[in-house]
Amino acid sequence: MIRIEYPDHPFRTKQEEGRHFIFDELRKIWLRLTPEEWVRQNFLQYLLQVQQYPAALIAVEKEIKLGELKKRFDILVYDQHHQPWLMVECKSTDVSLDESVLQQVLRYNISVPVPYLVITNGHYCAGFAKQGTQLQPLSALPLFVK
């Protein structure tokens, strides 16, 4: 597992009609604050502030096609040549990072091949480097080379 310590961040939140919302700074939209969205927004800030990944090279919740199915990845980071580089699948804090979560991100990887895959539930984070058909566990997220 990769140890993640989220940075302090002044998230913008609001409440309307008994629902909580959080402002997604990358997409410039208000989103319902679900447990999974909490993980996604905190992980994004970790990528931006701690890992120093460029905001301009991060895509959030974009649609992809898996055969006839339409799915959405959580986070995709592009490299300096604008090629898909690292894909992150976020789950709420009460979801275990089991084989089914890994299989989900591997299915997404069929449509959007990347050399690095990450799964997180906010408490735990696992990362893998793809080497051919093998997955090598990572002890830390890869550094972004500018």
Image (spheres, helix red, strand yellow):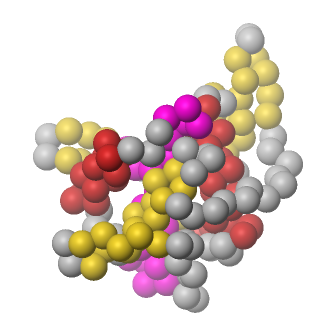
Give the number of callouts. 0
Q: Residue placed at 62% from the left, 47% from the top?
A: 123
Measured as percent of width and height from the top left, residue 50 is found at 72, 70
Residue 75 percent coordinates (x, y) = 49, 55
Find the magenta span and give its range.
Answer: 72-95
Q: Measuring 20% from the left and 39% from the top, which residue is drawn there?
A: 69
Q: Image quarter for residue 114? A: bottom left
In the picture shown, does residue 102 fall above or below 48?
Answer: above
In this picture, residue 87 sits left or right of residue 60: left
Q: Horizontally, is 28 left or right of 139 in the view?
A: right
Judge whether residue 84 is colored magenta: yes
Quadrant of the drawing holding the C terminus: bottom right
Q: Within the image, what quadrant is residue 44 found in?
A: bottom right
Q: In the rendering, at what x and y percent does residue 47 appear? A: 63, 65
Q: Quadrant of residue 55?
A: bottom right
Q: Residue at x 20, y 47 (%)?
A: 66
Indicate whether residue 56 is drawn in magenta: no
Name the residue at the left extreme.
67
